[in-house]
């Protein structure tokens, strides 16, 4: 995916000021940067949750800049949100049935409730190491377990690109490790990942390429080891 010169203003706030990135297939690209640097806004611009002021986004050579959100999702972009978005009164099974179903069978899976087999759902849960009965309601999951379910949903949706907004935010060190291993495995299986992370250390031994955003601009990109020593990057973080 190519992101070219994206701009976005919210009133007087210049959230994105000419953002350009290249997301390589089969690699883990990390997007880091201080609070308010525009990371989530860039995700929202890519998935057309907000309209860009300017800029172009290409997915496998196709211009998706003016496509509506659901069409972009259908093109194969699956994403999570910084704040876990789940339905309180639905179970793990319900969520994954919806995620796995395509638009056409969605209504059917709601009505019949047996569109997707439990075996298929269990497979997805196993991949993220969420060890809870399928009938468990979201309200009975811990914060960390909700993060895992959220990740499972993103993985379960048919996709070619997985975009994760802070997949380990607020989770304990043990679960961070588990999630990191899940991401490494996905990558080894050939997935293309774009991961937002606030903590530079988390992506150092995970990402192939790191992009650093500051005030809506890419101030550096490259291999994690190089980025770690970059003065502009250190200044951006220390100045936070
Ligand atoms: N819907 C919105 N309306 C108004 N301002 C917004 C909106 N979304 C984001 N902003 C502003 O745009 C800037 C970038 O926000 P964004 O959420 O993209 O940052 P971020 O890099 O994801 O930060 P964090 O690490 O805290 O999640 C911030 O100043 C924010 O207040
Ligand atoms: Mg954010």
Image (tube, rainbow, N blue to C red):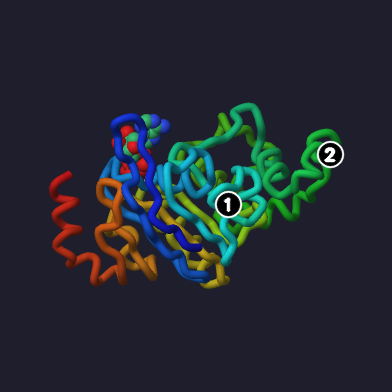
Specify the farthest residue to the top.
Answer: 89
Quarter holding the C terminus?
A: top left
Disc 2/disc 1 C-alpha distance (Å): 22 Å
Does any atom of ligand 1 lie closer than 8 Å to the CB of label 2?
A: no
**Could you tell me residue 82's position as x and y percent?**
43, 41
Is 215 above or below relative to 231?
above
Residue under the point 58% across and 50% down: 154
**Label 1: few (<14), some or many (≥20) within 10 Å?**
many
Give the SS element for disc 2. helix
- Picture quarter with ligand 1: top left
Residue sitting nearer the eye, 155 or 226: 226
Q: Residue 108 carries which label?
A: 2
Please, what secondary structure does the residue beneath circle 1 have? strand
Residue displayed at 18% across by 65% down: 230
Q: Is residue 49 above or below residue 188?
A: above
Apparent side of residue 210 relative to residue 157 in the rendered image (left or right):
left
Q: Residue 1: horizontal and vertical position, in percent? A: 50, 63
Residue under numbered circle 1:
78
Among all residues in the image, which is located at the extreme front? 54
Q: Which residue is drawn at 86% across and 37% down?
A: 112
In the rendered view, tell whether residue 201 sits above or below residue 91: below
Q: Nearer the viewer, residue 192 or 178?
A: 192
Taking the image as drawn, is residue 170 in sight? no
Front: mark 2 or 1: 1
């Amino acid at each position: 995916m190519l992101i070219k010169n994206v701009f976005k203003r919210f009133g007087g706030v210049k959230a994105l000021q000419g953002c350009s990135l290249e997301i390589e297939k089969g690699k883990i690209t990390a997007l880091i940067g201080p609070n308010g640097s525009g990371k989530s806004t860039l995700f929202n611009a890519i998935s057309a949750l907000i309209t860009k002021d300017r800029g172009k986004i290409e997915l496998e050579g196709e211009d998706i800049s003016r496509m509506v959100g659901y069409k972009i999702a259908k093109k194969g972009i699956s994403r999570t949100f910084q704040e876990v978005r789940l339905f309180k009164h639905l179970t793990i099974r319900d969520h994954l049935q919806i995620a796995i179903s395509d638009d056409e069978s969605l209504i059917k899976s709601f009505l019949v409730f047996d569109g997707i087999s439990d075996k298929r759902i269990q497979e997805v849960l196993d991949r993220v190491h969420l060890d809870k009965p399928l009938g468990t309601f979201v309200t009975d999951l811990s914060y960390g377990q909700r993060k895992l379910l959220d990740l499972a949903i993103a993985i379960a949706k048919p996709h070619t690109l997985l975009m994760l907004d802070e997949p380990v935010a607020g989770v304990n060190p043990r679960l961070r490790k588990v999630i990191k291993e899940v991401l490494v495995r996905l990558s080894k299986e050939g997935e293309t990942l774009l991961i937002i992370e606030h903590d530079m250390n988390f992506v150092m031994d995970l990402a192939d390429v790191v992009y650093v955003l500051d005030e809506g601009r890419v101030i550096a990109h490259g291999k994690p080891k190089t980025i770690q020593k970059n003065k502009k990057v250190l200044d951006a973080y220390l100045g936070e």
